[in-house]
Amino acid sequence: MFNFRKNEKIPTQQGEGKVIAFMNQKGGVGKTTMAYNTARALSEKGHKVLCLDMDPQFNFSSLFGYDSETHTHNIFHLMINSIRELKSLHTGILLSEAIIKTDTGVDLIPSGQELSGFELTVAGINSPRQLVLKKFIDKNRLREYYDYIVIDGPPTLGLLVVNILCAVDGVLFPFIPDSFSEQGLKNIQEVLLDIEDMGIVQTPKNLGYIPNLFETRRKQANEDFKNIQNTFPDAHVFQPFANKANFAKSMSCGKSVFDFQAKDYKELQTQFLKMATEIEEQL
């Protein structure tokens, strides 16, 4: 099913890989940026990493050079293919044809605009609609082939978000210190409580909150940050990521901070590596 790189070791223990997601209902908080650089940090630490884009806007996929016009296979088709009741909608693509491999040790299953129709497509199936993604991951033994699966979630609430939260071991919550992000975090927490009430899967672990684009000199930003900390007093909060020009530059170039050798990127690289270590320790 997979074409492994030379000398690449295949895990033998079933289900040893971990699945994590970056979530916030509020858009523009840096979910994609955090997911991309964290995936690279985990790879830098020697892990085999698969990125999974679950946002129909496919910004995550674009960072890997994905072009929706030339790459016609994405996660939507693979998930639909995994549902027996939707056999009439199945396509002939294989998982190995959809995965985009890179020389960084991080692979990708891209997204596409078709994913926006996921909820309507699965509306009539009898099998649990909230477990489609989890069953896809399990059926294709992705946890056996990858140490970490990193999911970039959409800035919405709905069936896609529920599918993600039912499939992951842990969730990270990037946010910009403001009232809009705080509300987005609260809304996602409500969905987590709903999943806990359903009792069909183990509730994913809250791995922590990631303050992004943080401006320490701005009084309102500090006050909003404190309010969010008070709202979620028991949650782990990662070291804030400052609003730096070189961080924005890396993303505008479609690159990770690990693609730059300049000294002013070393601090960001160290911060992401530290965050990757904390994820390892929590899972």
Image: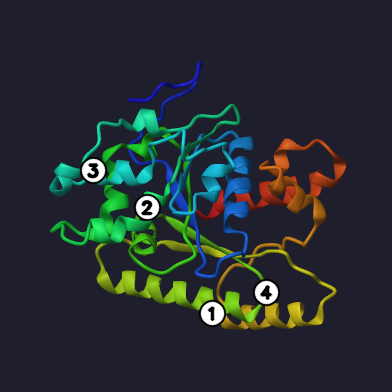
Disc 4 is placed on an element classified as: loop
Residue depicted at x 24% and y 63%: 200
Left or right of 171, for residue 218: right
Label 2, on which residue?
A: 115
Label 1, on which residue?
A: 183
Q: Amino acid at mark 3?
A: Ser
Q: Earlier in the sequence, mark 1 or mark 2?
A: 2
Q: Amino acid at mark 4?
A: Pro
Disc 1 is placed on an element classified as: helix
Residue depicted at x 26% and y 46%: 80
Q: Residues within 10 Å of mark 2 (few under 14, many from 20)?
A: many
Q: CA distance from mark 1 to mark 3?
A: 35 Å
- Looking at the image, which is closer to me, 268 or 276? 268
Q: CA distance from mark 4 to mark 3?
A: 39 Å
Left or right of 25, for residue 238: right
Labels 3 & 2 near each other (Cβ < 8 A): no
Q: CA distance from mark 4 to mark 1?
A: 11 Å
Q: Earlier in the sequence, mark 1 or mark 3?
A: 3
Q: Amino acid at mark 1?
A: Gln
- Looking at the image, which is closer to me, 19 or 32? 32
Q: Residues within 10 Å of mark 4 (few under 14, many from 20)?
A: many
Q: Residues within 10 Å of mark 3 (few under 14, many from 20)?
A: some
Q: CA distance from mark 3 to mark 2?
A: 15 Å
Q: Earlier in the sequence, mark 3 or mark 2?
A: 3
Residue depicted at x 56% and y 66%: 27
Q: CA distance from mark 4 to mark 2?
A: 30 Å
Residue 193 vs 35, above or below: the answer is below
In front: label 4 or label 2: 2
Label 4, on which residue?
A: 177
Residue depicted at x 13% and y 58%: 126
